Structures are given as C-alpha cells and as structure tokens.
Image (cartoon, rainbow, N blue to C red):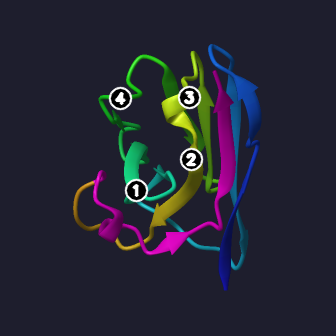
C-alpha cells in the first residue's frame, strides 16, 4: 500500500514563506504527475499546482502563479511546494496528490488516485 505524507505546514504571517513537502511511502509505485490542492473551511477543494514528470511541465492556479513554485523528484515520488508572499486567503489544508494512471487534466481532483492526509497552513494578517 502506498501512502503520501505531507509536511511543512504551520502558522506564518502575511508576506512570509513556507515550504511543503510530500513523500510517498510503502510499496514502489510510479506516477505520471503529482499535484497540490487546498481546501479552506466551507469551501470546495481547489487546485493549486501540478507537475508532470514527462517533460517536467508545471501548471499553477491563477491565484498562486508567481508566488508558489512546485518541484519534485520523480524517482523518489517526492514533490515540494515553495510558497512565498503568503496571504491570509492562502489559509487552508493543503493536500498532496499523485496520478498513477495517467488520465484527465492536472487541475481536476478526479485525475488523481492517491491523496495525502493534508497539512494545515495558516496565514495571519
């Protein structure tokens, strides 16, 4: 069984930075892409960023483009999210996800079949 484990969340002041990490543990598996989603209280889960291992292309939500950077290591099934210039509206639980099948669009949660438990990010004003 494969598990995705996120780390790096916490409390930060507006304008600050955090770096989230996500690592796969358990049996060996391969993924086509990995991504980050977030969910704020009372809101639906929304796409943040994704990286496709084929070619290393990345995709970002408009709300985070220019502030967040996704990177990772395909061989280790590890993905990172560097978050700079954080805003109070970035407050949410951040989830790591992996697509081991290779289907759908990177921004669509249904394209991912493996999910982490989430890590809380709180940005104070």
* Residue 38 location (% of width, % of height): 49, 51
| Depth check, front residue: 29 or 48 | 48
Mark 2 lies on a secondary structure that is strand
Q: Which residues are magenta?
A: 106-125
* In front: label 2 or label 4: 2
Asked whether disc 3 touches disc 2, contact meaning CB atoms under 8 Å apart, the reply is no
Q: CA distance from mark 1 to mark 2?
A: 10 Å
User: Upstream in the sequence, badge 4 or badge 3?
Assistant: 4
- The residue depicted at 59 percent of the width and 27 percent of the height is 83
Name the residue tied to disc 1.
43
Corner quadrant of residue 66: top left
Res 74 visible: no
* Residue 36 location (% of width, % of height): 49, 49
Asked whether disc 1 touches disc 2, contact meaning CB atoms under 8 Å apart, the reply is yes
Res 106 visible: yes
Q: CA distance from mark 1 to mark 3?
A: 15 Å
Residue 92: numbered disc:
2
Number of residues whose C-alpha sits closer than 10 Å to that of mark 2, classed few (under 14), some (14–19) or many (20 or more): many
- The residue depicted at 70 percent of the width and 29 percent of the height is 18
Q: CA distance from mark 4 to mark 3?
A: 12 Å
Mark 3 lies on a secondary structure that is helix
Mark 1 lies on a secondary structure that is loop
User: Upstream in the sequence, badge 2 or badge 4?
Assistant: 4
Asked whether disc 4 touches disc 3, contact meaning CB atoms under 8 Å apart, the reply is no
Is 60 a magenta residue?
Answer: no
User: Upstream in the sequence, badge 1 or badge 2?
Assistant: 1
């Amino acid at each position: 069984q494969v598990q995705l484990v996120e780390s790096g969340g916490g409390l930060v002041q507006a304008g600050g930075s955090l770096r989230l990490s996500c690592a796969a543990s358990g049996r060996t598996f391969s993924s086509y892409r990995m991504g980050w989603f977030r969910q704020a209280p009372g809101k639906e889960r929304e796409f943040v960023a994704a990286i496709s291992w084929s070619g290393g292309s990345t995709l970002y939500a408009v709300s985070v483009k220019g502030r967040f950077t996704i990177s990772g290591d395909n061989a280790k099934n590890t993905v990172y999210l560097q978050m700079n210039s954080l805003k109070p509206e970035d407050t949410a639980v951040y989830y790591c996800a992996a697509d081991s099948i290779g289907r759908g669009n990177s921004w669509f949660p249904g394209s991912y079949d493996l999910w982490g438990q989430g890590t809380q990010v709180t940005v104070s004003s």
